[in-house]
Image (cartoon, helix red, strand yellow):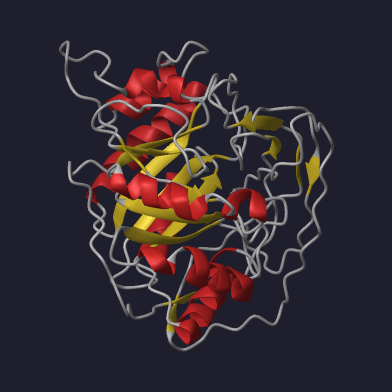
Amino acid sequence: MKFSAALVSIALLATSALAAPTNVKKRCRAKSSSAVAATSTTALAESTTAVASTTKVAEPTTTVSATEAASTTKATSSSKAATTTKASSSSKAATTTKASTTSSKAATSSTHTSSAATSTSTSSGIKRGLSYNDVSLTKGFSTRIPGALKGALSKVSWAYNWYSQSGGSLASGINYFPMLWGGDSSHTATWMADAKAAIAAGSTHLLFINEPDLSSQSNVEPAAAAQLWMTYMQPFAGQATLVGPAITNGGAPMGTTWLDTFMDECDKLGCQVDAIAGHIYGSASDADYYKTYITSLGSRYPGKPLLMTEIGVSDTSTSVADQSALIDTLVPFLDGLDTVTHYAWFMAAADLLVDADGSLNALGEAYENAA
């Protein structure tokens, strides 16, 4: 997708006096290649009657704040210059917005058993990855570590672009993970062929629907998502690691509440979900929030590894120094957390991790060099 001006306002009712940092950013699904429209989302209310189950362990309180005006569009077409957002299709431009939402929830978290767990460790042992739209903007991570000896290998081992085709060649040693972004025909029409081709080319993981718990994203109900899984993911069981929906870190009915319902629906249908996926956005000054949330999510479904496919900050005006400090704290934490097999900082796009020519900027070097 390419970024274009849009304004998103989300109103979520707070249900607790405790508030965690603002954390959810949003991207809008593709409309048309020329669409530049303000997007509005349905206000979500959270019940104050949420009760923790006796079989659940405490999950960090999540907040989703009311407004953020930054927005961008992304295009996945390899012939277009990608800016800082994501595309849901290679031929369409999509509006993208980041927002923080506000909601405090009665903290609850389930521990579930795994029915069909598959090892998802990277063959290189490197967990670090990239999200991108324009494959040419990944080149800064291709062959060297900035500041290291010439020829040293990058610390990035995998990448994805919210689409089912890579849009070009990634550097040797970077594994491409295709994604079925959503359930409409613009995504499903080519998915089976694209996924089959990706696996044949060496892709080890298949990713499934982006932020289905957010109305401005794939916006899929859990039961419908389970049906989509059986149609489009289940046929690839045993051929690749099948990764569940990438949820936000928003409060109920979003986030883990949505995920638990999806997993329950999948149990009824016999889905094989090998791993789970999550996104987290918060305050750069509160690394402990990230650590607590990721640790909790990673232990929620024992035996199912966790891929944190988007990590970033809610406030886009956060300084590079503060974001770099957060990266320096989180990277060794994630590398040492057994339940996490892959993670990606948002994203390889101009003014985020790279410059317009694809060379690493200060934040990109912080991500590449963190140890």
The answer to which of 344 and 95 lies nearer the viewer is: 95
Q: Is residue 242 above or below residue 290?
A: below
Query: Where is residue 47, by image quadrant?
Result: bottom right
| Picture residue at 49% right of the left edge, 72% below the top | 230
| Picture residue at 70% right of the left edge, 41% below the top | 30
Query: Where is residue 106, by image quadrant?
Result: bottom right
Quarter of the image with the C terminus in it: top left
As drawn, is 48 to the left or to the right of 320? right
Position of residue 366 measured from the top left corner of the image (x, y, whole percent): 36, 24
| Picture residue at 26% right of the left edge, 54% below the top | 337
The answer to which of 212 and 81 lies nearer the viewer is: 81
Position of residue 140 measured from the top left corner of the image (x, y, whole percent): 36, 18
Q: Residue furthest bottom?
A: 54
Quarter of the image with the N terminus in it: top right
Q: Is residue 290 visible to us here?
A: no
Q: Is residue 117 above or below residue 184?
A: below
Q: Residue furthest front?
A: 193
